[in-house]
Amino acid sequence: MKNQNYALSIIPFVVWLIYAIAPLAANDHDWPTFRGADRTAVAPDTGLLKSWPETGPQLVWEAKGAGRGYAGVAIADGKLYTLGDGSSSENDKDEYLIAFDQASGKRLWSSKTGPAWNVGKDTWQGSRSTPTVDGDRVYVISPQGKLICVDTKGAEQWRVDLKEKFGGKKAEMWGYSESVLIDGDNLICTPGGSRNTMVALNKVTGEKVWSTSRKGDRGAGHASVVISEIGKNRVYVQTTGSGAMGVRASDGKLLWTYDIDKTTAVIPTPIVRDDLVFMSVGYKRGGALLRQVADGDRVSVEEVYPLKPSLGNKHGGVVLVGDYLYGDTDDKGTPFCADLMTGEIKWKSRGSGRKSASIAAADGHLYIRYSNGVMTLVKANPESFQEVGSFKVPGSGGNPSWAHPVILDGRLYLREGDLILCYSLTGEGGETTVASPTTTSAQVVAPKDGEMLTNGDFANGKANWEVDKGDGETATVEMVKDGPEGKSAIQIKVVQVPDEPWQLQMYQAGLSFEKDQSYVFSFWVKSNSSGTIKVNCMQNHEPWEHATEEEIYLSTEWKKKEFVFSGPWDDKNARITLTDLGTDDDRIYWFAKCSLMLQATKKTLRGND
């Protein structure tokens, strides 16, 4: 009887324990929401590369179809999810929740969430909420405040309008960015405003469980809720436009607030360690450390140190590694290291990138991604700033690279607008996989003096070249060694003719041209049968104006093709394209020794023998 009573007595404790660890019980091989399962942005991976080669880590795969936006990626049960509008895989400009295969980057499905977010400047527009995955459900909030639940096969289950149902509002003009928290049976999110500042919903039905009212709340910020355990209280910690707050998980009671003066926006997600809460606000406000104090079922908060301007972070986030904080100084592209308990700055330094920087950490290193497209590896060392690797992310250079990096199972995942890129952080990547529909560019290889193309000789395979395949698996792409004079070449084999010949093309973008300057483009080509393709130089953005387009005759023998053209505009994001490759089934093309250089002569066309 004694043992039986003991067993019965521990049941409530076991139930509580299961409930307490539920949000952290994600598969070790998952990153199911913004900043990971525990919302720290610190991955548990070990055995990762301690430095990178000049060209960066090995690209494992690259996929198109993520659409426009800054949402990060969530990964669970072998699938990767993100949110974007105007996806290259869709026929409209609306916003979609999109799923990819984690191993290959193959696009699996999409589910429309609503119209695109087109408010404000061009760089302010687009999707921003990273999805949250829980079992067979995926949850996401659109910029307009629509909370949507979709199953992992893409079928919508329910949706709730946070503005309409709860009177929610943002603290500024930018759209909703929060990634919802799933805690046991409840979904926790922040509509914002004084009526229903935070709400708990049944995650299966979307019905309200409880709500929290914060008097005078200015509206939702951009952070996501984190969990702390204080005494017997489970506390949800969040920031809004009015500052930080703590909410009791069991019933939604507002336990404490830490109010701040009105500012432009409150964006970074708080950091919780035991009873401590670190919050940061950009726009010259600063970072503060708070201590939660339990008194029975009540919790209050004390200030360890107030907002220190040197600890302010605008939107790249802050990570805690050991006893030290690491993040960007406001949005200046100047990372800092600070002592958590004192706020003392240990170092502040510039790296290879510029402008604002987002951050994650793993295996004693910081993964710092600058908004100009440069990705860096830095030692997490409070003694000094030591950058041990950097590379330029393919496809960057247009809108800011604001999506946060994700590290999982020895892989680095980056969302760059419409692209998702997966890199090996262990040195074991194998051949780069081109998902469908996708592009194929990889490591940045510095061109030779005077040469404008990167990896024009294909010595690094498909790196820095992108291949559009239209809608479907229309071609295979691989590097071969039987080019002219035994040089490397790219082989493109048509396996299915696309709807239009131009939908199968290979190009290199990000090229700079000056108006009225002359350039010469040359390459070697052959095919398994005679025919024609087209070559053009064009803008890599709207209005897609052409500088030139030439028809090239093909032979079954290697032939050098060369033409000279003049740029009609000053443009820093143009491209050279080999197009109209999708003409015949079983057609095979080989390309080698591509070169683009300045040329003083007038436009001529040669080599069509």
Image (tube, rainbow, N blue to C red):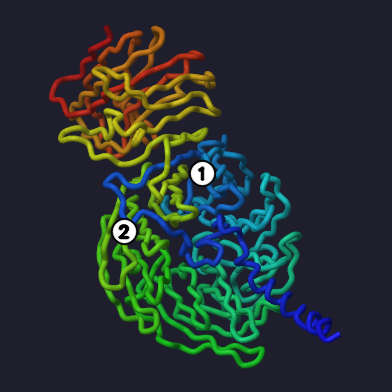
Q: Position of residue 231 (x, y in %)?
A: 61, 86
Circle 2 residues within 10 Å: few <14, some 14–19, many ≥20: some
Q: Secondary structure at mark 1?
A: loop
Q: Position of residue 163 (x, y in %)?
A: 64, 63
Q: Is residue 293 above or below residue 284?
A: below
Is residue 97 shown left or right of residue 8?
Answer: left
Q: Is residue 206 above or below residue 232?
A: above
Q: Quadrant of residue 605?
A: top left
Q: Which residue is mark 2?
A: 355
Q: Is residue 243 visible?
A: no
Q: Secondary structure at mark 2?
A: loop
- Quarter of the image for the N terminus: give it: bottom right
Residue 297 vs residue 538, the one in the foreground: 297
What residue is shown at x 34% (from left), y 53% (from top)? 375
Extreme-bottom residue of the structure: 295
Q: Is residue 552 above or below residue 448?
A: above
What residue is shown at x 41% (from left), y 8% (from top)? 529
Q: Quadrant of residue 395?
A: top left
Extreme-left residue of the structure: 600
Q: Is residue 316 above or below residue 83?
A: below
Measure how far apart labels 2 and 1 are at the Cα level: 23 Å
Which label sits on residue 418?
A: none
Q: Which residue is mark 1?
A: 66
| Amino acid type at image mark 2 | Lys
Q: Position of residue 459 (x, y in %)?
A: 29, 31
What residue is shown at x 52% (from left), y 40% (from top)? 105
Circle 1 residues within 10 Å: few <14, some 14–19, many ≥20: many
